[in-house]
Structure formats: C-alpha cells, structure tokens
Image (tube, grey):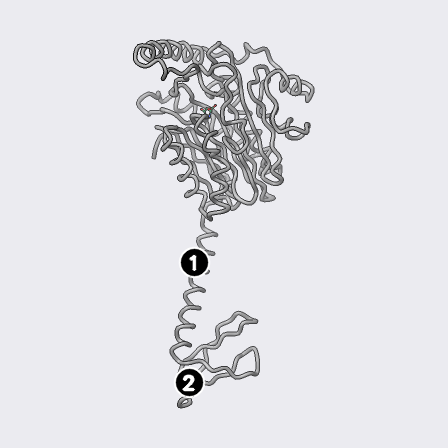
Amino acid sequence: MLAATVCAKELTIKLTFMRIIPNRGVVGSSPCSSKKIIIKPLAALIVLLFLQLCALAQLKEAAAENQATKYVLVIHGGAGTILKKNMTPAKEKAYTDALKQALQAGYAKIKAGNSSLDAVEAAIHVLEDNPLFNAGKGAVFTHDGRNEMDAAIMDGKNLAAGSVAGVTTIRNPISAARAVMEKSEHVMMAGPGAEKFAKQAGLTIVDPKYFYTEERWKGLQQALKEDSIKSKLDHSSNQSQQKLGTINTDYKFGTVGAVALDNNGNLAAGTSTGGMTNKKYGRIGDAPIIGAGTYANNNTVAISCTGWGEFYIRNVVAHDLSALMAYAGLSVEEAGKSVIKKVGDMGGDGGLIALDKNGNMAMPFNSEGMYRGTITKEGKIEIRIYKD
Ligand code: ASP
C-alpha cells in the first residue's frame, strides 16, 4: 500500500510502502523520528494530494515571478483629452522622443548604481525642460497670466518628502522639492519663500518670462473666452450655483511624473506641474501634496498622479493606493484601478503611474489618453499615448 509520511523538520514528502494492520490503519515510521505514526489510508492520500498541490502552486508562483517583467522606471507626461485624430505624426514623434529621452536619463542613473531619487529627478528634468509638457518650460498660465508651478518628491526608504508650490522663478521645480526634502527641516514651501530657499540652495533661478510659450498662452486665451461664456450662462440660469475660480477642466495637459526602483530596492516618486490653465488666485493642485498626487513607500509602492487635482486631493489618491496594498493586500494593478474609479465616480478625470517594491507597475487612467512610458530592468522601453 502506497502512503505518505511527512517530515516537519526537513519539509519533505517521502513515499513509502506501508503495511495495513486490521483495525489499526496504516503503520509506518517517520523519517525524522523513530516514533511510530499512524495515518488512516484515506487521510494519508488526502495529505499527499494536498501537499503535492501546494508544491505545484509554489513552483508555478516562482516561475511566474521569474518570468514577470520587472520595471525600474515609469514616467508620465500628463493625462487628458489626448486623441489620435487631433495628433500629427510629427507631434506624436516629438512626444515619443521626449518620453524616451526622459526614460533613458533616469535609467542611466539606475544602471550606474545611483538612487531611485536621482533617476526620478533626472527623468523629470528632461520633461521640465521640454516645452511640450506642462511643467517647467511649457507650464500653463494662471488666470492672471502667470506661470505658477508645483512639484514634489518622496523617498520610499524613509518617507522623507519635499515639495514646492506656486513658484514662478525656479527653472526645475523638482530640484527645489528635493532641496526642501534634503536641505531643510520642512516638507513643503510655497511662493516667494520657496524661491528664496531654492536660490540659497544653489538652484538655477530664471526670469518668469523663461516659462512663456505661445501654445500655453493661446490655451489661456481660449480658456478665458470659455470662462466668460460659462459665467454669463451661470449668471442667467442660477446665480447661487456660480463658482468664483471655476477652471476649465479640459486645459490641463502635460503634468509630468516619474516613479523608480533602484538596485537597492528603494522606491521614489516625483511630480512636477504648472497645474491647470486659468487656475485662479493662488490655487495649488495635488502634485505637491504628499499622499494626494505624490507618494512613495518601500513597503508598498511609488505613485505619481496627473489629472484634475481637486479630486486627487479629496480622495488622497496616492496614499489611498498604497494603503489598499498595505491593508487590503491588493496588487498594484487592482489598487490603481480602484482609486481611479473613486476619482471618476466623483466626477474627476486623470490617471496615475505606480511602481511596486517588486517591480510591477500599473498606469490606470479614465481620460482619453495619458502620455506614459516604461523601462524594464533590461532596458526595454515602451511608450504609449492613447487608450489601448
Ligand atoms: N494634477 C495637476 C493639477 O491639478 C494637473 C495635471 O495633472 O494635469 O495641478
């Protein structure tokens, strides 16, 4: 009779031929002790089957783990009404090239053994310096015709974080955010104070005119026109519904963000933005608010968001995603979907990028498109713009 004995110490399964003794079941001797154990034949079979199934499942899991693509850097260049029919091949190429260049800059840092923070900062610099994106050069205009930028960075290793809000003269706001994190005792600095601090930290300060681009200026003029039509309509229909500071939600493309995982298993996240076109009177979005638009924690995931910031703040999206992984055991994919659904259910739109501690990523969005790119551990790049 074939039966099974299990050695708890060695965690092995041993098959042996055993003798059936009437009324006593099967008698065999354990390979890890000299004590005799008695196992009923049916129970022995069930145990054996169960253990074999467990072993098989473990093997399958290990194989899947080995085969799964491991990502080290994921970036976005904003979410919004990005439709193929509105895109020229030249424009599409320009976006693709810029995203590629940002991925390569960040990847070079990781390859050289630098930190995920270095990779995030390097990737975001490329996008901030490119007028195609709504961050740094290319930032959108406020209602008053200014460029007021927000940025944040977070270190998943120790939950250190830094951010700046409403800055107008710092060429690369992501570096100012990093300076706040590393060179001050604070997490967030805003306006002229943040600019004074950035200057002291040795960062490049530019004339606010540096951020002017024709395209963004035209975007503001269009938004102002629509705003005045809307306010006339609001006025004639229901005055109490009228909101001062209403912003046109369709004028917010190109926020940039990056999440990275370095060779030491450290996660980092960063986001940089001009915010929303036609934003009014010192409005600050989700990007510089830790836990809303930006978050990183080595125990779970690194996240950078893009979209209608007010909804991301109210849903504390980035931290919510991490919490769903930590407390509810969701995968990065499931948690990403869940938080974007919450934003959508409330009437908000946008997307996010997330990279977990094991190199799995997710890039959910509920808008028409999201500029996004990934690079694997082996250096394989993938860029996407539209819905799949
Ligand atoms: N989330 C940004 C903000 O609300 C805008 C964007 O991502 O496009 O400031």
The residue positioned farthest toward the bottom in the image shown: 22
Pointer 2 local density, CA inside 10 Å: few below 14, some 14–19, many at least 20: some
Task: Please name the residue that numbered disc 1 is placed on.
Answer: 60
Give whichever of 85, 148 is nearer the camera.
Answer: 148
Q: In this view, does 44 lie to the left or right of 129?
A: left
Q: Nearer the viewer, mark 1 or mark 2?
A: 2
User: Which residue is painted at 55% across and 12% down in the image?
Assistant: 210
Q: What element carries label 1?
A: helix
Q: Which of marks 1 and 2 is nearer the N terminus?
A: 2
The image quarter containing residue 270 is: top right
Q: Where is residue 61 in the image (x, y as percent from the top left)?
A: 45, 56
Quarter that holds the N terminus:
bottom left
Give whichever of 141, 240 is nearer the camera.
Answer: 240
Q: In the displayed structure, would residue 154 be above or below residue 204?
A: below
Residue 275 seen in the figure? yes
Q: In the displayed structure, would residue 51 be above or below residue 282?
A: below
Q: In the displayed structure, would residue 185 be above or below residue 45?
A: above
Gap in angstroms between the C-alphas marked 1 and 2:
34 Å
Q: Where is residue 114 in the image (x, y as percent from the top left)?
A: 62, 37
Label placed on residue 165: none
Residue 103 seen in the figure? no
Q: Position of residue 217 (x, y in %)?
A: 44, 10
Q: In this view, does 163 lie to the left or right of 219?
A: right
Q: Position of residue 41 (x, y in %)?
A: 40, 80
The image quarter containing residue 244 is: top left
The amino acid type found where label 2 is placed reads Gly
Label placed on residue 25: 2
The residue positioned farthest toward the front in the image shown: 240
The amino acid type found where label 1 is placed reads Lys
